[in-house]
Image (cartoon, rainbow, N blue to C red):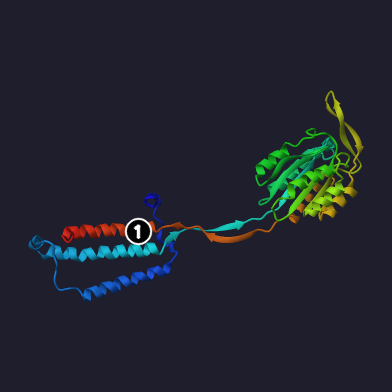
Amino acid sequence: MEWLKEWWATPMPAVASIEFARPWVLLLLLVIPVFIWWRRRTRPPALIFSRAGLVATGPHRTSRLARVAPWFRWLAIAGVIVALAQPRSGARTQNVTRDGIDIALVVDISSSMLAEDFQPQNRMEVAKDKAKAFVSGRTTDRIGVIAFSGEALTQVPLTADYPVVLAAIDNLQPGQLQDGTAIGTAIATSANRLRSAGGRSRVMLLLTDGENNRGDIDPRTAAQASAQFGIRIYAIGIGSEGMAPIPVGRGLFGLRYENRPVRIDEALLTEIAESSGGRYFRARDADALEAIFGQIDQLERSPVDARSFVRFTERFHWPLAVAMLALLGEVWVLAWRGTVP
């Protein structure tokens, strides 16, 4: 009787919102008036009683019960027919089948990312802010975070849990790994995460401000291997032109900075990006970095396939309940009339 409990707890829907899964079954309702007309034409002229004592009560009460009883039966039959037509209600909604892309956000956290040529923030803080804005603009993609300097480490595997991704980006700080710039190791680590991903496409966003000077993996070889897995690399060189204040150690009052030339191996980053079908960008200030993320955002938009569907709530319980009550009513009338032993 689980359906009865469910029916009792379900509110009565508005009549205007009801539709039928098998509306053709409702044609059977036309049989009822035809059958009533036929029965009246062929009705026997005599009344049959199960007990002679009922005749003493007079014909008025008996004839009235005789007229009422069949209507309960027709009502029960009508209720069953309506229930078989499967009445249901539901609001039309949109079911969107989203097949996004997989993005590995690969961030250089070497000490040079503390250079303060992106005033009022350093490179690291600007890179984190723009990366978070990029992540916040995605809706259907899985994103992973890989940090690297002299070595590479996955901070967050590919996931659509954007709050987790944003928190991981917030926690990126120079000094978490051995210092240096191992671009080849970073690409290989990220490609290992992306190669078996099931998205429509695979993208690597490589943010660095230096030259490859650590690691045993050649960046060109790693990029070519990535291309074999269909991974596109968008490389972003972060840093102004000329000289920049770069931390060189700690003093009594915190980090000590010296103006040193900005060295970004643009030729290497360009080759890496183009060999994988991606592009290289140079971000000389915060606005440029924001614009670059905006371009990549437009380049890597995945189309969304949508199909509409209707989620229904079955309402056959109501006419079925009416049919049951009508049957009970007929049994009660017949018992009162005396035709049921």
Give the residue displayed 26% in from the left and 57% down from the top: 328
In this orientation, which residue lies closer to the viewer: 50 or 118?
Answer: 50
In this orientation, which residue lies closer to the viewer: 124 or 304?
Answer: 304
Q: Quadrant of the C terminus?
A: bottom left
Give the labeled residue for mark 1.
320
Residue 181 is drawn in which quadrant? top right
Disc 1 marks which amino acid? Leu
Residue 91 coordinates in the image, percent (x, y): 49, 58
Res 120 seen here: no
Give the residue displayed 71% in from the left and 41% down from the top: 156
Mark 1, secondary structure of its residue: helix
Residue 175 is drawn in which quadrant? top right
Q: In the displayed structure, would residue 147 be above or below residue 11?
A: above
Give the residue displayed 86% in from the left and 29% down from the top: 249
Say whether residue 280 is left or right of residue 26.
right
Q: In the displayed structure, would residue 288 be above or below residue 179?
A: below
In this orientation, which residue lies closer to the viewer: 50 or 123?
Answer: 50
Q: In the displayed structure, would residue 259 be above or below residue 78?
A: above
Residue 143 coordinates in the image, percent (x, y): 70, 47
User: Residue at the left extreme?
Assistant: 56
Say whether residue 218 is left or right of residue 24.
right
Res 136 seen here: yes
Residue 207 is drawn in which quadrant? top right
Residue 193 coordinates in the image, percent (x, y): 74, 46
User: Residue at the top extreme?
Assistant: 252
